[in-house]
Image (cartoon, helix red, strand yellow):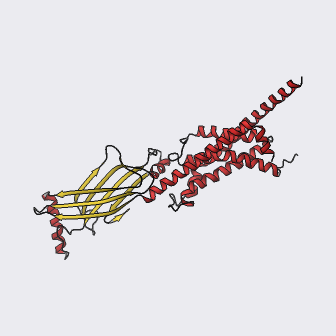
Amino acid sequence: MVQLSIRADDWKRILVLSLISAPAIAFMSFDFVFPNVSTPSLDKNLLVAFLVAALFGTPAGYFNRRTDHAIMTVFVYITIGYVIALIAYSAPFLFYDFEVIFPGLYIMFFLNMTVILIMLFVFGGIVGVIVGQVLRESYEREETAQVFSRLR
Amino acid sequence: MTILVDLRSRWFVATLSVAAALFFTGAIIASALTYVSVMDARQNIKLASAVEKTEQLPDGSLRISLTIELHNPSREILHITSLSWTVKIQNLSHPDNALIPIVNVYAVPTEYAEIGKHEVKIYEYEQLVSDPYTLSSISGFINHSASEGIDYTLESVPYTHDFRVVAWLGDYEHDYDYSKELYLNDMVKIERRYYGGWYN
């Protein structure tokens, strides 16, 4: 059995790619809870959320040669994005002195509203990874063909 | 880092990705700031400085008035949808069934009445009570109170003023129907009340 390891350099790659995709996840999560105050709103449209999630999964597949690293990147950027969304959701209470709007179920409310969305982010991200890898392979094939045509 | 080399060599896709990331970073910051602004408005929009006046006129009728301020210190425009002012005499031992209604004014603006950012709106209401039925009800209350050892005049009767205002914040959407999404309506709805000397 082959052990797939993640080296320090791979973690850096995963982190950099996560920083590219996490803002979209953060925005969509926040927007799903408060579509009336966010700009530009997706209006709780799950299909659009899925397509955007797939689009932002593409860099993870495009810049990662190994599929396990790409999938890992998807999980890392969803986690980072979700944490950023929670910070944005808590901004009036974390950074300002405003009353908590739903004191009893503060975090649970956010989780409850976005649980389906998280699943969609994971699925969309994996689809995006596949699309990214297909694009990369196609691009590399094109590059190789051009190099060999010059040699002839 | 090899990723930076990769990003440089695939500069077109890398630039698009970074641009999209920047766009969504801006969007989440702008949305969070709007959310803060809405929370600010919800907390700081207040009724204040209510002045209740009652005056007995020479012809025996009663002039009753209320002046009250609505403070909007927030960055949001307030769209008023309804205003109401009622005055009644409340028998505190039987608050539900022993009311004498004196004034009932309810206004629904046909168009949104706006209160701008950082603005204070003063509402002034005045009503002349000359209807014999209402005046005799007040006299009945005064006589009943006198029989229990409390002396009131037409001016000193404990009139209970109830002023309510309902408004929407800014131009945020607020027509969500599903029970799961009613919190979105509540979030941008402002309801303030002045009742019996208390502000809610």
Q: Residue at x 45, y 49 (%)?
A: B185
The answer to whether residue B25 is above or below residue A150 is: below
In the image, B29: left or right of B93? Answer: right
Residue B90 on image: x %, y % = 26, 65
Residue A40 on image: x %, y % = 55, 42
Q: Residue at x 50, y 46 (%)?
A: A36
In the image, B30: left or right of B128? Answer: right
Q: Residue at x 65, y 44 (%)?
A: B21
Q: Residue at the far left: name it.
A: B59
Question: Where does the C terminus of chain B fall, quadrant-wise?
Answer: bottom left
In the image, A74: left or right of B91? Answer: right
The answer to whether residue B26 is above or below residue B96 is: above
**Number of labelled discs?**
0
Q: Residue at the far right: name it.
A: A152
Work out whether residue A113 or residue A65 is closer to the camera in this orientation and state it: A65
Work out whether residue A26 or residue B184 is closer to the camera in this orientation and state it: A26
Q: Work out whether residue A68 can be spotted.
A: no
Q: Work out whether residue B74 can be spotted.
A: yes
Q: Quadrant of residue B171?
A: top left
Residue A123 on image: x %, y % = 68, 41
Work out whether residue B4 or residue A140 is closer to the camera in this orientation and state it: B4
The answer to whether residue B185 is above or below residue A102 is: above
In the image, B115: left or right of A86? Answer: left
Residue B1 on image: x %, y % = 80, 48
Q: Residue at the far top: name it.
A: A152
